[in-house]
Every structure is written in C-alpha cells, then in structure tokens.
Image (cartoon, rainbow, N blue to C red):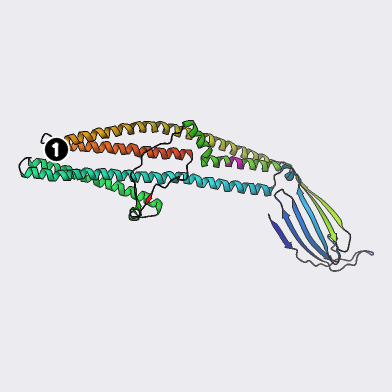
Amino acid sequence: MSIRRWLSSTSRRRVRKRPKGALIPGWALSTTTNVEKATESGLEFLLGYRRAEGVLEYSNIKTGDEGEVRMGVKIPVFAVAKGMTARRYTLEAASIDAVQSTYVSKENLRHLRFDVYAAYYTLLSSREVLTLESALLEKARQRERFIRSKVSVGELPEIALLELQRQILSREQRRLEADNAYTVALGNFARFLGLSRGALEARYELPPLPDAVPKQIALETALQDAWQQRPDLKSLQYEKTRFGLQEEYNAVSKYPRLNVALYGVHDFVYDNGVKVSVEMKFPIERRTYAGRKKEIQKGVRAVDEALQRRRIEIETALSNRFATREMLRANLQKASEEVSLAEKLEAAEVKKYRLGAGDLVLVNRRELTTLEVRQKQLSYQLRLLLLGLEIERELGASVASTDPMVQR
C-alpha cells in the first residue's frame, strides 16, 4: 500500500486583460492537496481538496471561498481485466523471492548436516583406531618384560629381545600416525562447534562408533521422497513459477495502455460536478513484448532442463548408493566373522609361544593380522554410516533428528 501526499506550490501570475464582459483580470492563487491510494487490483483512489482565488487563465479554475472536495478513481482497464497489475506483480514476485530464500537456506543446511555428521563419525572411527593401535603397542610392551626375564635366565636367546624391541618401535610409529589422525579429526569436528580441541574433550564424552543400521526403504519410495523433499528441486520449481508470473505480466503489455478516471467534485458554494477522463497509449511496434516473451520461454526451457537433469542425477546417485550399501552390509558381516577367527588364531599362537613351541615373529604376524581385520571392520562400519548420510542427503534431510553428543 503506497500513499502519496503533496501540497502544490502556490503560484501567482498576472492575468492579461480580457475583453469586455469577461471576468476582471488580476492575481490568481490556487492551493491543492491530494491523497492517493493504489490497491493491489490496480485501482487508484483519490481524495483531494482544492481552493482557487480568482481565475487561472490556463485552466479556467474557479472555486468558492470554502474550496471544493474531489473524490475519484482511476482504472487501468486492460491490467484490471487481465488481473495483473504492476503492484500485484511486485507483491507476488517478492513472495516468490522469500520462499526461494527459504529453500536456499534449507539446501545449505542439507549439505551442512552431512558435513557435521561425517566429521563426527570420522572422529569416532579415528579414536577407535587409536585405541586399537595403543592396545597393540601395550601387548608388545607387556611381552617385553616376559622375554627379558626369559633371556636373563638363558631360556631365550638375546636376539628374541632385539626382535621384540624392533616390533615396539614399529608399533610406536603406527600409534603416532593414529594419534595424529585422531587429532586432525578432532579439530575438524571442533570447528563446527566453535570450540578448541581441549574444550571439546573437556565438555563432551565421545561414545563408541555406533552400529550402522540403515533404514529399510525401497528405491522407488526413496526417489519419490527425494523429488518431493529436495529443497533444490523446490527452488527450481519456484523459479518456474516466477517465469509464469513474468509471462502473465508481460501479456498485459501487448494491449494498449488504457486508463479511465472518474472524479466527483463537491464545491461548498457552487454546484457539484463530475469529470471523466480517458488516457490511451497504443504502441505501434511491439518489439518489447515479443522479445520479452521469447526470453521468458527460453528461461522456462532452461528450468525444465535443469529439473530433468537433477532428477536423473538423483536417480543415479540413489541407485548406486543402494547397491553399495548392500555390498558393505555383506562385507561387514563377513569382517565380523573374520575378526572372531583372527582373535582365536592370535590367542592360540600366543599360548604356543608362552609354552615354548611358538615363534615371536608368528605372534607378531598374528597380532598385526587381528589389528588389520578389526580396522577393516571399522572401515566398513564407517563407510556404511557415511553412506547412510549420503542417502539422507539425497532424500533432502536438512535437520538432525537426534543429538549424537553426550554432554558431561
């Protein structure tokens, strides 16, 4: 709603002498105050007051001493008939802009959610790996005391102690690498919370890496959900709505500009009156309308192509991820069984070595094999969790349903 209010400047001028019988020439003074209100439908209403002293030669205006009151309406005929005025176009375009801004924010949140959870699960996984490497190193250090005692009494050669010390050095290097990976992952996740590494560890307790339990949903259902929920698709659909609005507004420009105004005047001294005015502007060449129409049609085709391309990308991404998910679930199950077997073989080899029937090199090999199998199991578990996040991102998830952090 826009209201314009102005007070016209006072004008004085000398009126030249008129022929005999005309009004007496002299000074003329006119004061006008108008208030106009435009509506969304295109109608413009006028309420005004005018008072003229003397006679203005150029417009022959004369009112009583009390002035006159004017009321009227101005109608853009074709714009009203088509239901599309400049004011309505501005309001609806602003509404589309507001909705599109909302979907742009949701699109950013969709990617942010994936980044935060991916950093979180990577942190938990790296801590699990650090725990495994620390346990492997601790096994070697505990064995060092056992072997040193055996060497001191002559039951084992000194070379066994040298071999174990080499293993300890190798495992210390592995632990340093795992500790560095954990520190990097901790920093990557802490930046999303606006905390330092130390503040994060002091304030929160990190739980174990959760089990990957993917949601049971059919591919066709997932595709339908994605097409209905993805904010980027919604934004493109509203962009198409914008072009439809522009096309509707542009269609009005092919008609002449026809404005009809009707004013009623009430003078406090003289009689009432009515004034009707017609303003018409007809463009001979309609190049602006034709050019704008082609531009809008080109924009609509571009949006349709973008929507179709995005749908194909979503379908391909979801199909690939669903297939990969089944493979990872099967491998995770096999890795769990492999861990159980590796732990049994390791325990048997350690027992043989303590009884004097085994070899330290074989013990080291068994322990490394168990570690690698457990790390592989963690890798499958992490990949399944990240894959679940990717599927949720493709479906349009932008807000976390649960808080994974456990506050101290």
Q: Quadrant of residue 164?
A: top left
Q: Nearer the viewer, residue 242 or 20?
A: 242
Is 64 on the left or on the right of 48, as rendered?
A: right
Q: Residue at x 67, y 41 (%)?
A: 248
Span colored in magenta = 238-242
Q: Residue furthest right?
A: 21
Is 204 on the left or on the right of 272, as rendered?
A: left
Q: Nearer the viewer, residue 144 or 356?
A: 356
* Image coordinates for residue 85, horizontal then vertical, percent: 70, 47
Q: Nearer the viewer, residue 102 or 7?
A: 102
* Image coordinates for residue 379, horizontal then vertical, percent: 32, 38
Residue 2 drawn in magenta: no
Residue matched to label 1: 360
* Image coordinates for residue 334, horizontal then vertical, percent: 31, 31
Is 25 on the left or on the right of 196, as rendered?
A: right
Q: Residue furthest left?
A: 154
